[in-house]
Structure formats: C-alpha cells, structure tokens
Amino acid sequence: MAVLLTNSVATNGINKTVQMLNQNVSSLDAIESGIRLVESDPEAGWVGYGGHPNLLGTVELDAGIMDGLTLNAGAVGALSGYLHPISVARNVMEKLPHVFLAGNGAAKFAEDCNAETGDNLTVRTCKDWNDWLNNNRNLSESNNWPDVSLIRLSMLTANNKTAKGTTIFLAQDNDGNFSAGSSSSGWSFKYPGRLGDSPVIGSGIYADNRYGAAACTGMGELTLRSNTARSVILYLKMNMTLKEACYEALNDLRAIKTDFRGGVTIYALDAKGNRFVLSVRALDKGLPECDTYYWYWDNQYDEPVKMNAVMENWYKGRICLLYTSDAADEL
C-alpha cells in the first residue's frame, strides 16, 4: 500500500507526490519531486526560494533524504546559491562515498552536479530581515554593521515568532519501500553556519523498511540532542506500538535541560500501516511553535486528507509505559 505523510508546509508538493505514488513510482523519486515543488514556492516560507536568511542576509539551506530499503542517505547543510537542496542531498547519497556535505563543500558539489542556481532571497524575506535588524540592533551594531559580534543578536532570535519552518515528507511506495525527506532554510536570522535537525540523519529524518519512518519539525536544537527520528524507529524495533514509540521519544526530549523549549512535532509511520503525529507546544509564546495539523494519504483515499495532530505540553510528568509481547496493538 502506498502512503504519504507530510506536514502543513508541504501543501504545494502533496498532489504531485500522490500522483507519482499512484503510478508506482518509487517513494524516493516521489518525495524528491514533492519537496522540490515546496522549495520553489515562495509562499511556503522557510523552505528553498523565499526562505528566511541568516543574520547577515544570506539564505542557507539544509536538506536530507533517506532510503529505507538500503539505509543509504544524503544531506547538505548551509548551502547557499542553489534552489533545490533536496536534489543535491540525493546526489550526495548516490554519487559520493559520503553522507553529509556542508557550506562551501556542499556548494562545490552542487556545482559539480550542475544543480540549478538562484538567489533564494525574495523581496518579502529581505524586508522581514531588514525590519528585524532595525528593531533589534543597538546603535553601535547599526553603525558598524556587519563588522560586529553576532552573539547578542543570535540570542534574540530565540524569541522570534517567525523562527520556524521545515517541510518533511514520509512515504511508502507500492513495493513497500519507505523514504524520508526534509528541506528547510532553518531558523530565521540564525547565526551563519547554524545547522538544524533537518539534514541530520537520525535527528530530523530516518527510514528503515523493517520498522517504518519518522521525521521532526520545530526546534531542531532539541531533536538534535536526543536523535529523535532514529529513536522512534529504535523504539519500534523494541516492539513498542507507534504511539508508544513517539511518546517515549518525547520522554527523551523532556529529559533535556534547557531554557529554550520551542515547539516540536514528531511524524511517524510504521511497517504495519499505522501513522501517528505528536506535537509538543512551546513553553514561551515567543518561541517557535509546532504544527497542529498534517496531511495524510494512502490508496484508500481519493485525495490527501488534513488531520489534527495529537497535542501535548512539555511538562506533564514522565509517561510510564508497560511493554508486552502484544505491544503491536495501537493504544
């Protein structure tokens, strides 16, 4: 059975992906095509063209893709000057002995692959950047820009309500092969070179045909520390249900000691045909929020369906789960 699970940002690429899955195209090809459409959509925000720049005004893009059949993966981070980081990431997976390239090295590889070049900064996002700087730089920083320390301003972006945005695609094709993909311009007005969880295999995405696929959006600084996407798959391997696996991954996130707790959403599919999406709300209303809904499709639906995520708060006490040999049943 073909299946697609995406987040709210993915709207522009969903129908193309569904069409390809219906035509027995591989899940890898289908999600790459869908993500490329999101990367081309300036209204998506925080992804590809129209993504928000870093503190110095450069749009740096992150993307990752993983094949659940082979466990091969590719990723790029802090890539600037190219329109489709998801395709560059796939080329890393298929053409290099490496998994992850970043910065100048990623750009050199994109050039070697004849990847499509372009300026991802739009009039709207340039205005957002200028407005934010004008509202937050002090007099000394304004007078000496850009030859100033960025540390103070970087800390201020942690309370920026626009500092969020990633697209994730999880799919299973009619041959039963899972794939996971993610693309993002990352934290708005981030410190140059910042990498989030989106391109990090195991933190932002993971796929394994034996168990399923998982992805995360929201505050990547949290999921990076607990390897959240991979954790969900490992908990499935331990015979937890999909719901149990996602909540146990949430328990891992809750164990992190930090003053910054933006929203996080965990998206997951298992090899038994189940889906689960768990969103954890930010503690501070100024911090990045989480998705409250997602898109789902399988062969039983004529078109993708908008569904509500399960909502949780960060602090609700650790959830204790009892695992048995019958843990395959959904809670």
Image (cartoon, rainbow, N blue to C red):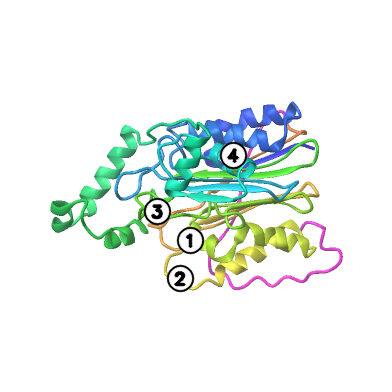
Dividing the picture into quarters, in which one does residue 229 lie? bottom right
Q: Position of residue 84 (x, y in %)?
A: 50, 35
Q: CA distance from mark 2 to mark 1?
A: 10 Å
Q: Position of residue 41 (x, y in %)?
A: 47, 31
Residue located at (80% from left, 63% from top): 239
Q: CA distance from mark 1 to mark 4?
A: 26 Å
Q: What is the number of the mark on residue 258?
A: 2
Amino acid residing under circle 3 = Gly
Q: Position of residue 97 (x, y in %)?
A: 62, 49
SS for dot 4? helix
Q: Is residue 130 above or below residue 154?
A: above
In this view of the protein, which residue sits in the foreground, 316 or 252?
Answer: 252
As for residue 140 lying within the magenta part, the answer is no
Amino acid residing under circle 1 = Glu
Residue located at (18% from left, 56% from top): 141
Can you identify the residue that label 1 sits on? 221
SS for dot 1? helix
Dividing the picture into quarters, in which one does residue 312 lie? bottom right
Which stretch appears magenta?
302-331
Q: Contact (CB < 8 A) between labels 2 and 1?
A: yes
Q: Earlier in the sequence, mark 4 or mark 2?
A: 4
Is any part of residue 246 visible from this angle?
no
Q: Earlier in the sequence, mark 4 or mark 3?
A: 4
Mark 3 burial class by Cα count in 10 Å: few <14, some 14-19, many 20+: some
Can you identify the residue that label 3 sits on? 193
Can you identify the residue that label 4 sits on? 91
Quarter occupied by the C terminus: bottom right
